[in-house]
Image: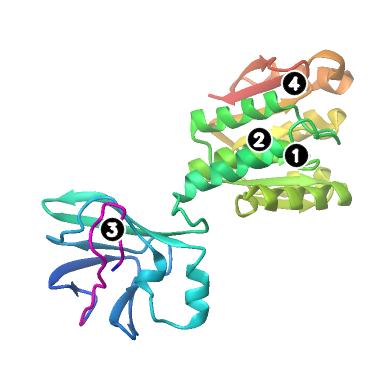
Amino acid sequence: MGRSRNRLKSEVWTLDRLENIGGHKTTALSEPTVIDSPVGRVVKFDGVDDALFIDNHPLAGDHWFPYRQIVGGLDAAIRAESQERELKMRGLICVGAGVLLAATLSTTATGQDPSAALDTTVQTFLERHRGTWRDLNVPESDGRVLHDLILEHKFTRALEIGTSTGHSGIWIAWALAKTGGKLTTVEIDPERHRTALANFKESGLASYIDARLGDAHEIVPALPGPFDFVFSDADKEWYKNYLVAVWPKVVRGGCFTAHNVSGLGAGAGIREFLAHLETLPDAVTTIDKASRAGISISCKR
């Protein structure tokens, strides 16, 4: 069905039905389909979860097959698309000579794994924009703190109060892309919101972010939750109110984090917020000082 990088000969797996390919019994996962082509009936993979388990096939192992080889001879639109994509046929489970072949489409010509491709896209974006973040965005060091905290605890249900133009949201969503989660983020300023949307798209993380435009004073209390991660970086005099509104919706083991809790940013609103944290019997709070701004990290026990 293609030419692997391990010098296996090119072949098209013709079949009478999906359960039998090249004389070998198969088991389908998800919904790969059988289609007619000028070279015979072939398997078409539509989504990242399509897979086949092929018993006793010589292609057992970890190989790559050019997408255009698999759909070769189909209509021009598919052939044109195939010039920029490869189909990864990856050995995930080997039983004897059998192999589970999981199909994923990549937008790169190298057939890069989607998660690795996303990492590359995000890293390239962050490098390109390094040193340019203004408009109340967090510094890179604090973005990394949020990213690593989410990965460490495998958080998946995140809320950000105060998007700005998206720097912290990108670090948060990048981690959530690895844990299978999603971020809801709220911004009141239309121009910052538009810029953030563009940044989310450019970074490749837009599908992991629900970016809302509006007043967090109204939106945040109305959110149903639950959340396992919250990051507050909006109006400091309202920090306590955000905490009061959200803390009951934070699951046990989840964390409420807040920016600018030390140094010059710690005004009356911050002091009130920190004082209220001390009254919560189910909260354990530490202050991360990766930057002068400081991040409070309050986790529910």
- Tell me how many marks there are: 4
Comparing 281 with 220, the one in front is: 220
Pointer 3 or 4: first along the chain: 3
Distance from label 1 to label 2 (Cα)? 8 Å
Q: Are marks 1 and 2 in contact (CB under 8 Å)?
A: yes
Instruction: Say what amino acid the circle numbered 1 marks.
Output: Ile
Can I make out residue 222 in this image? yes
Q: Which residue is mark 4?
A: 276
Q: Which residue is mark 3?
A: 101
Q: Residues within 10 Å of mark 3 (few under 14, many from 20)?
A: many
Q: Which segment did they paint magenta?
A: 2-16
Pointer 1 or 2: first along the chain: 1
Residue shown at 63%/37% (left/top)?
A: 172
Can I make out residue 248 in this image? no
Q: Which residue is mark 1?
A: 161
Label 4 secondary element: helix
Comparing 283 with 133, the one in front is: 133
Pointer 4 or 1: first along the chain: 1
